[in-house]
Image (spheres, helix red, strand yellow):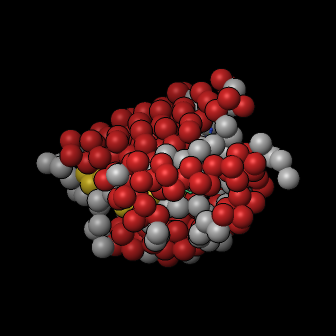
Amino acid sequence: MNLLGKTVVLTGAGGGIGACLAQELAKSGARLLLVGRESKTLERLRAILPGGPLTHMIHVADLCSAQDREALSLACADAQVDVLINNAGVGEFNLLENSNSEAIAALLDLNLNVPIQLTRLLLPALKARPTAAIINIGSALGSIGYPAYSVYSASKFGLRGFSEALRRELSDSNVRVMHFAPRATRTPLNDAKSQAMNTALGTATDAPEVVAQALLRRIHGNRWHASVFGWPERFYALLNALSPALTDGAIEKQLPEIKRFAMNES
Ligand SMILES: NC(=O)c1ccc[n+]([C@@H]2O[C@H](COP(=O)([O-])OP(=O)(O)OC[C@H]3O[C@@H](n4cnc5c(N)ncnc54)[C@H](OP(=O)(O)O)[C@@H]3O)[C@@H](O)[C@H]2O)c1
């Protein structure tokens, strides 16, 4: 898809991956509708984007509010949005027994319910465009269930399933659907405990700029099918689908370390 002149709504625009995506999208000639909860963050980002601040728009919204989502969908219809990128998300690195019901509900809401609801609201406007796309930012943990990420994994497995079904549901329409799944990325989403665990286990992590560039290559190349970004995670996702027992064994060996970091013991 050629993004030149396309209008793209990007949620979580002020975050680690979001801000890098905004740069790459603007570089490709897209006009952006930047969404986040803080106008100052969005204004700062808009000021440094290619194309100049007059090209891009900002929209302040708490996406967990149904009212804010309605207002955003009206703004998107007015702006004749061609592409929706559901990027806003939260993480929790914690054993399930140490989590609490509020944190679980908030994570499932933002990571799974919000993209589904926003997509439904924007679909009529997207269908009215000559070509349109919905891009859901998942995670490698949406293909590989990982200890201390059980709720996060559940949300991202759900998002992957939603994306796959919707891509097939819309395959006779003008709207393409992509699910893009980064592996661990160096952003504020990962707390100190999870970063320390990644270092101890030698887990590969990417810079958010690299993740954003990889997504842009997929958009430009019309590669709409679900894919985990990065090796060996893409291989493990495949292996896990074919033989979860093998993956169980490999991850079981890491479990004492994972638990040590999740429980913040030194
Ligand atoms: N970092 C990783 O290791 C990693 C790996 C795989 C996938 N991902 C996925 O990549 C996406 C972006 O994550 P990130 O790493 O860039 O995280 P991040 O730096 O923490 O950014 C998250 C963004 O979500 C927004 N957000 C949070 N709650 C919101 C709400 N209620 N309403 C509106 N916006 C809200 C935040 O906006 P505010 O500016 O308003 O706070 C922030 O811009 C997420 O879907 C995440 O699951 C991340």
Residues 8 and 52: in front is 8
**Is 13 positioned to the left or the right of 192 in the image?**
left
Q: Position of residue 221 (x, y in %)?
A: 30, 73
List x then y, in percent, for residue 84: 41, 51
Q: Residue at x 68, y 29 (%)?
A: 97
Q: Residue at x 41, y 64 (%)?
A: 234
Which image quadrant for residue 220? bottom left
What is the residue that sits farthest to the right in this orientation? 266
* Residue at point 54%, 27% (across, down): 67
Place of residue 91 in the rendered image (x, y in percent of width and height, measured from the top left): 63, 45
**Residue 159 % position (x, y):** 42, 43
Give the vertical position of 15 relative to 209 (above or below).
Answer: above
Q: Is residue 135 visible?
A: no
Residue 229 in view: yes
Of all residues, the one furthest to the left in this rendering is 172
Work out which residue is located at the far top of the displayed protein and give it: 101
In the image, residue 109 sits, relative to residue 138, either above or below, namely above
Q: Quadrant of the N terminus?
A: bottom left
Residue at position x 27%, y 54% in the image:
176
Decide which of 258, 84 is in the foreground and name it. 258
171 or 125: nearer the eye?
171
**What count of labels does the image hold?**
0
**Relative horizontal placement of residue 215, taking residue 169 as reference (left or right):** right
